[in-house]
Image (cartoon, rainbow, N blue to C red):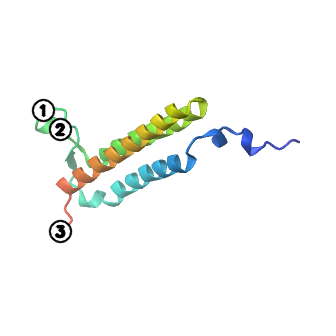
Amino acid sequence: MKKKKISNLPISRLAFPSTYLVVLVFNLLTIALIFLLKSQLPPEIPLFYGRPFGQEQLAQSIKLIILPITAFVIALFNAILSVVISSRFLTQILLGVAIITTTLAFIAVLQIIFLVGSFWP
């Protein structure tokens, strides 16, 4: 039985593997933060700011995980796509998109938590 070399596996062809790992773990930590602070959040939070003001903007507080999950999926898709693409410039663009998406999702989650959360008595 032949052993596969690690250099032949697709993960070894991933450009910037540690950066992608940090981005994916950061998204998972953001999801964990939402679950940890769920008791401090009201049952409904303003999440859909593109909708008209009022009841249409509100969602259940657990739906706040939509933002980091979306950023996680984008980062994972970009990591998989960067294995297939041979251009270093395009892999850097994909990594930049993953970092920007993760950062903006984290900022949006923090703003919503600080806007509606009850952390002080």
Closest to the observer, 75 or 87:
87
Asked whether residue 73 appears in the rendered view, the answer is no
Element at badge 1?
Answer: loop
Mark 1 touches mark 2? (CB < 8 Å): yes
Badge 1 density bin: few <14, some 14–19, many ≥20, Cα 10 Å = few
Residue drawn at point x = 41 percent, y = 37 percent: 97
Query: What residue occupies the far left of the structure in this picture?
Result: 53
Q: Is residue 104 left or right of residue 43?
A: right
Query: What residue occupies the far bottom of the structure in this picture?
Result: 121
**Amino acid type shown at disc 3:** Trp
Element at badge 3?
Answer: loop
Quarter that holds the C terminus: bottom left
Q: CA distance from mark 3 to mark 2?
A: 25 Å
Q: Position of residue 14 (x, y in %)?
A: 60, 40
Closest to the observer, 16 or 119:
16
Numbered circles on residues, count: 3
Task: Give whichever of discs 3 and 1 has the lower sequence position.
Answer: 1
Task: Give whichever of discs 1 and 2 has the lower sequence position.
Answer: 1
Q: Position of residue 5 (x, y in %)?
A: 78, 43
Q: CA distance from mark 1 to mark 2?
A: 7 Å
Q: Is residue 82 left or right of residue 34?
A: right
Element at badge 2?
Answer: helix
Mark 3 touches mark 1? (CB < 8 Å): no
**Amino acid type shown at disc 2:** Gln
Q: Which mark is residue 57?
A: 2
Q: Position of residue 32 (x, y in %)?
A: 40, 56
Residue 8 sits in quarter: top right
Q: Which mark is residue 52?
A: 1
Q: Which residue is mark 3?
A: 120
Query: What residue occupies the far right of the structure in this picture?
Result: 1
